[in-house]
Image: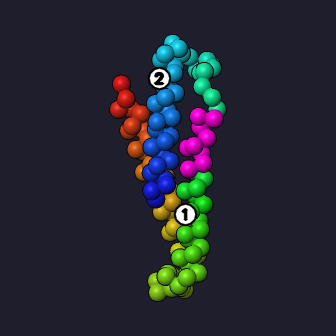
C-alpha cells in the first residue's frame, strides 16, 4: 500500500511539473501543442505502479497458499482472490483521488 501511495505522489508531482511547463511556455488550452518535457519524466511513476501491482498480486498468492486465509476462505479461495483484487483497485482509486486533489489544489 505504501508503494501505491508513493506512486500516486510521484504522479502528482509529475503532473504539477507538466502544468508548470505548460504555463511557462504559454501552452495552456492548446491540446495539440507539444509540451517540451522528456518522456523519461514519466518513468519513475510507471515503475512504482508496476512494483505496486506485482507486490499486490504476490501478496495475494502468498496469503492464500500460506494458510492465513484458510479459516474464512478455504471453501471459496476464488472469493479471496477477488477480495484482494478489489483491495488493489481501492488502493489505486484512493491514490488517484489524492492525485486529483493535489493537482486541483495547485493554483
- Note whether 27 is above or below 16 in the view shown: above
Label 2: which residue?
A: 20
Query: At numbered mark 1, what does the secondary structure look like: helix, strand or loop?
Result: helix
Q: Nearer the viewer, residue 99 or 77?
A: 99
Marks 1 and 2, the one that precedes in the sequence: 2
Badge 1 crowding class, 10 Å Cα cut-off, few under 14, some 14 to 19, many 20 or more, is: some
Q: Quadrant location of the C terminus?
A: top left
Can residue 79 be seen at all in this image of the molecule? no
Can residue 69 be seen at all in this image of the molecule? yes
Place of residue 61 in the rendered image (x, y in percent of width and height, measured from the top left)? 59, 73
Q: Which of 81 and 8 is in front in this view?
A: 8
Place of residue 41 in the rendered image (x, y in percent of width and height, measured from the top left)? 59, 34
- Magenta residues (range): 40-48
Badge 2 crowding class, 10 Å Cα cut-off, few under 14, some 14 to 19, many 20 or more, is: some
Q: Which residue is drawn at 55% across and 63% down?
A: 56
Q: Which residue is drawn at 47% across and 45% down?
A: 8
Q: Is residue 61 magenta?
A: no
Label 1: which residue?
A: 56
Amino acid at each position: 500500500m505504501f508503494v501505491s501511495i508513493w506512486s500516486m505522489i510521484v504522479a502528482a508531482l509529475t503532473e504539477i511539473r507538466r502544468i508548470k511547463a505548460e504555463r511557462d511556455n504559454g501552452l495552456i488550452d492548446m491540446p495539440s501543442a507539444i509540451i517540451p518535457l522528456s518522456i523519461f519524466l514519466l518513468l519513475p511513476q510507471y515503475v512504482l505502479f508496476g512494483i505496486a501491482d506485482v507486490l499486490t498480486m504476490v501478496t495475494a498468492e502468498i496469503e492464500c497458499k500460506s494458510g492465513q486465509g484458510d479459516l474464512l476462505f478455504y471453501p471459496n479461495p476464488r472469493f479471496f482472490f477477488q477480495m484482494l483484487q478489489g483491495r488493489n483497485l481501492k488502493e489505486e482509486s484512493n491514490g488517484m483521488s489524492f492525485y486529483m486533489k493535489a493537482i486541483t489544489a495547485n493554483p
